[in-house]
Amino acid sequence: MNAPEIALFGEWNTANLGDRMIHRRAAEFFRSCGWRVSSYALSSLVPVAEPGSAREPPPPRGRAAARLPPGLRRALRGVRQEMRMLRLLPALARAQAIAVGGGALLSDVNLHFPQSLAVLTRAARAQGKPMLCLGCSAEGAWSPAGVGIVRRFLGACALIAARDAATARRVAELLGRSVPVFGDFCLRESDFADAGGQRALRPALAVNVSCPPAVAARVQHEYEDALVEMVRFSRAGPAAMHAITVFTTGTAEDAGPARRVAARLASGGADLFLPQSVGELEALLRSATVVVAGRLHAFVLALATRTPAVGFSPAPKLRNFLGSLGLERYGFGPDGGAELARLIGADRSALWNEQRDAIRRAPLWAVRSRIHGLLRSAASAPAAQRGLLLAEAHRALA
């Protein structure tokens, strides 16, 4: 029997290395459930090359529409998304299900994602396709228009499991029923199965600098100041770091702050690294003994390479996610620089062991296992029963 096809939507064709890694891991997950995967970019509603292909997806180019007033831009984009979906309908007709995930795809951001979710919801209903929403989060407030679109999209989904507990609570308020936490696709239980400790390395600190949206300039300035002071502190004492690398995870908005922080630390020999591929980022993380992460995927990918990490960000997104893993004590804001520095100076093997053990105990693995079983059963079922199995998936998961 041929494997059924699932249309997988996410932010795959950007320069963000975390999103590229989500694409790779999400495709692996659905394939392991017995599905063939066709990938599409949620923002542009176009097919995207399979993860691991020789050609990395280029970042989207800026357009003149970005200079238009926000209201006019939203209106034009709504029309454009309708036209794009019309072109995509024949490809969607070949799929037996539609999945959205993961990343911050339930966020509003001036209706950027909701407009795509709206046309996707209508297309799925018109074609009778079951929809899934796995590993997604919502960052920031929803506008009145955005909250209605997100509610309709989630209400049409057969199966929902959020990326973090904070998003799960927001979704539960919208739908009037609880939803489980799936975690981030980049996390795999197999990455933490080994009981061994962290490998011994020459002390090296990798510092990920971020500039989250909607963070006030004053808060960003305080964050960068605290980051510089923390790094300077880490160079002192018996556990001093011998190498410092300031880096980003490919997000364009982070490059300027990273350059500023690296320049302030240059006199102490700090290097600046702006990786262009997931492979380059993973190589850096493996070379570090500790990672200070401003972005969620700097933290997640550090752990996946068996490198302990601590979160330090001016926005709550990373700290919300860490709470879902039982790692909330490793997440800090701009006022936590002193405590963060002390944690970095602690025994690094013990730090890794604590984090690995906490992640292994996280409830999300049981949730993910049940979802895997549901999707695998649906994939192996006769075509006439597959849609019914997926349509009832949320009841089976509950």
Image (cartoon, helix red, strand yellow):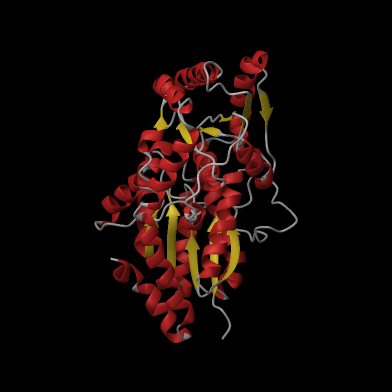
Q: Residue at x 59, y 57 (%)?
A: 24
Q: Is residue 43 visible?
A: no
Residue in the foreground of this view, choosing between 303 and 382: 303
Query: Is residue 172 rendered to the left or right of residue 256?
Result: left
Residue 280 image position (x, y, % from top left): 69, 42
Judged from this view, the residue extending furthest toward the left is: 176
Residue that appears at 41% across and 84% down = 385
In the picture provided, is 394 more to the left or to the right than 298?
A: left
134 versus 375 height, above or below? above
Q: Quick one: quadrant of the C terminus?
A: bottom left
140 to 217, vertically: above or below: below
Q: Is 123 left or right of 390, judged from the image as shown?
A: right
The answer to whether residue 341 is visible is yes
Q: Is residue 39 above or below residue 261?
A: below
Q: Please provide percent x and percent y for residue 171.
A: 32, 52
In this picture, is 133 found above or below 395? above
Q: Residue furthest right?
A: 54
Q: Horizontal and vertical percent for residue 331? A: 41, 33
